[in-house]
Image: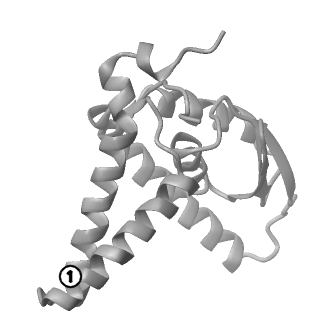
Amino acid sequence: MTESRSTQPANEAKRPLRTALARGAMLFGLWIVLMHSTKAGDLAVGMLATIAATWASLHLLPPETGRVRFGRMLLLTPRFLWQSLKAGVDVAGRAFAPGLPLHTGFVNYRTGFRRGQARNNFATITSLMPGTVPAGESPDSIEFHCLDTTQPIVAQMADEERLLAKAFEPGRTHG
């Protein structure tokens, strides 16, 4: 039996509205920054554009009941920067040493993240692992193009997923 909205806790039921208002405020703020105008006509057009952009945003990336733990996300920053540096050095080394053996190919990684914000963040972070870039996805996995498939890519992905999962409080997607 599905739970109706009226029996959900008040905070959970209000989350989609808060998300819409927050996104709308950010988009309207961006409009004002880009327009450098507070004329009534410009603000009216900006409000219409904001409504349309907010609607599109909510449909393309629906709000979730989970949330980001920013403190834990910040703790990942040094690792993220280190991985980015390693990836840049690795790719540059391969570019300047063409004799370096490459074992290119695709690796499918079954992720526990559903499509949405957490999964997008995971794909972004793992794209900075040396020699990997997300190339496709299915409902339960992400396909990565790799410069060297002999590396322990799946184990590295599992480590990244485990660390990133600590930065998110789980939730279910609103339907």
Q: Where in the figure is residue 86, as x and y percent of width and height?
A: 53, 57
Colour setup of the view:
one colour
Q: Where in the figure is residue 155, as x and y percent of width and height?
A: 70, 32
> Is 36 situated left or right of 121 in this image?
left
Question: Which residue corresponds to the image point at 69% horizontal and 77% vertical from the top-left?
Answer: 95
Question: Mark 1 Cα within 10 Å, few/some/many (few <14, many 20+)?
Answer: some
- Foreground pick, 150 / 169: 169
Q: Where in the figure is residue 82, as x and y percent of width and height?
A: 44, 51
Question: Which residue corresponds to the image point at 47% horizontal and 36% vertical from the top-left?
Answer: 64
Q: Quadrant of the C terminus?
A: top right
> Is 145 situated left or right of 174 in this image?
right
Question: Which residue corresponds to the image point at 20% horizontal and 80% vertical from the top-left?
Answer: 32
Residue 152 in sight in this render = no
Question: Which residue corresponds to the image point at 82% horizontal and 43% vertical from the top-left?
Answer: 108
Please tell me whether mark 1 sits on a helix, a strand or a loop: helix
| Residue furthest top in the image | 1
Identify the image quadrant of residue 93: bottom right
Q: Quadrant of the N terminus?
A: top right
Q: Give the residue type at disc 1.
A: Leu
Q: How many marks?
A: 1
- Position of 135 relative to 19 (above/below): below
Residue to which mark 1 is pinned: 43
- Foreground pick, 40 / 89: 40
> Is 107 situated left or right of 80 in this image?
right
Q: Where in the figure is residue 102, as x and y percent of width and height?
A: 84, 63
Residue 42 in sight in this render = yes
